[in-house]
Image (cartoon, rainbow, N blue to C red):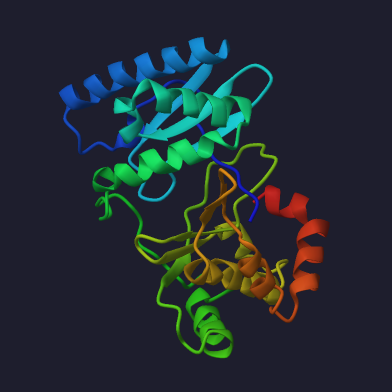
């Protein structure tokens, strides 16, 4: 689904979480600052870097005419020069071929990706004010997947209110088998079939994982797209999203 991320306005290692010692955070800050400087020199533009300890998204970014806002997993603080250049090419220059270099590096760094939640991370809560995601998931699983999708589901946390041009309505974490749905959908103006469609979409990610093709990452392979069209109100859901994008962006 459409994607948008929230970024810090300055270089930051705060996303590494408060469980780290002050000395460790200071060391990470110094290394992150060096990496941001290296990327900035490579791209000849300001780079605003946030270092994360995410379990699913290793690289995310937002480009503008004046700066690159970048979120990287802490594994990239030790990346060799070739991988740093790939980050610059992929995030700063839009070179999709560089994504294959990043995928290979991330696969080799799997032991550094945290598996468990931190204590300060919210657990999944499927019951919203207007929609019960667990009930929707169970119904879809029974009707369209013969009960074969094994995943937990819940509402994500509401992001800070700010202007945005796109929104990520759902996400599936392959490692933890968790589906999180944007809480902006838990409102009376949103038809139930649209929420069902977003849940259905994320469930498909368990059947059709992302793959590499022609040197680039394919998040929705053809088999995924073909199966997605099996949703009875597929056309209506896409039309509702198009016509109500401004409502969704306001959260």
Quadrant housing residue 73: top left
Depicted 139 relative to depicted 163: above or below: below
Residue lying farthest front? 214
Quadrant housing residue 58: top left
Q: Is residue 251 left or right of residue 7?
A: right
Residue 223, position as x, y percentages in the image: 62, 69
Quadrant housing residue 238: bottom right
**Quadrant (top left, top right, bottom left, bottom right) of the N terminus:** bottom right
Residue sitting at 56 percent across and 30 percent down?
A: 91
| Res 29 seen here | yes
For the residue pair 61 and 78, the one nearer the viewer reads as 78
Q: Is residue 13 left or right of residue 101?
A: left
Depicted 20 relative to depicted 66: above or below: below
Q: Is residue 131 left or right of residue 51?
A: right
Residue sitting at 51 percent across and 82 percent down?
A: 135
For the residue pair 181 and 89, the one nearer the viewer reads as 89
Residue sitting at 60 percent across and 65 percent down?
A: 186
Residue 46, position as x, y percentages in the image: 54, 14
Residue 102, position as x, y percentages in the image: 44, 37
Depicted 192 relative to depicted 154: above or below: below
| Res 59 seen here | no
Q: Is residue 85 left or right of residue 20?
A: right
Depicted 245 relative to depicted 9: above or below: below
Q: How many discs appear?
A: 0
Residue sitting at 69 percent across and 76 percent down?
A: 193
Residue 169, position as x, y percentages in the image: 60, 57
């Amino acid at each position: 689904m459409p994607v948008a991320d929230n970024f810090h306005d300055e270089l930051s290692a705060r996303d590494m979480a408060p469980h780290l010692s002050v000395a460790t955070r200071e060391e990470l800050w110094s290394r992150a600052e060096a990496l941001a400087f290296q990327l900035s020199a490579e791209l000849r533009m300001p780079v605003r870097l946030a270092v994360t300890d995410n379990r699913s998204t290793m690289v995310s970014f937002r480009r503008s005419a004046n700066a690159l806002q970048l979120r990287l997993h802490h594994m990239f603080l030790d990346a060799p020069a070739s991988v740093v250049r790939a980050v610059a090419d992929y995030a700063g220059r839009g070179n999709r071929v560089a994504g294959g270099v990043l995928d290979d590096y991330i696969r080799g760094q799997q032991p550094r990706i945290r598996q468990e939640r931190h204590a300060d991370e919210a657990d999944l809560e499927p019951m919203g004010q207007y929609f019960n995601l667990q009930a929707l998931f169970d119904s879809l699983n029974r009707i369209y997947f013969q009960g074969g999708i094994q995943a937990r589901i819940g509402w994500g946390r509401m992001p800070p209110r700010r202007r945005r041009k796109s929104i990520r309505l759902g996400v599936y974490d392959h490692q933890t088998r968790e589906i999180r749905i944007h809480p902006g959908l838990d409102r009376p103006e949103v038809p139930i079939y649209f929420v069902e469609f977003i849940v259905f979409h994320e469930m498909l990610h368990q059947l059709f994982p992302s793959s590499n093709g022609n040197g680039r990452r394919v998040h929705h392979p053809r088999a995924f797209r073909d199966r997605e069209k099996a949703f009875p109100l597929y056309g209506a859901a896409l039309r509702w999203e198009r016509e109500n994008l401004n409502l969704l962006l306001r959260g």
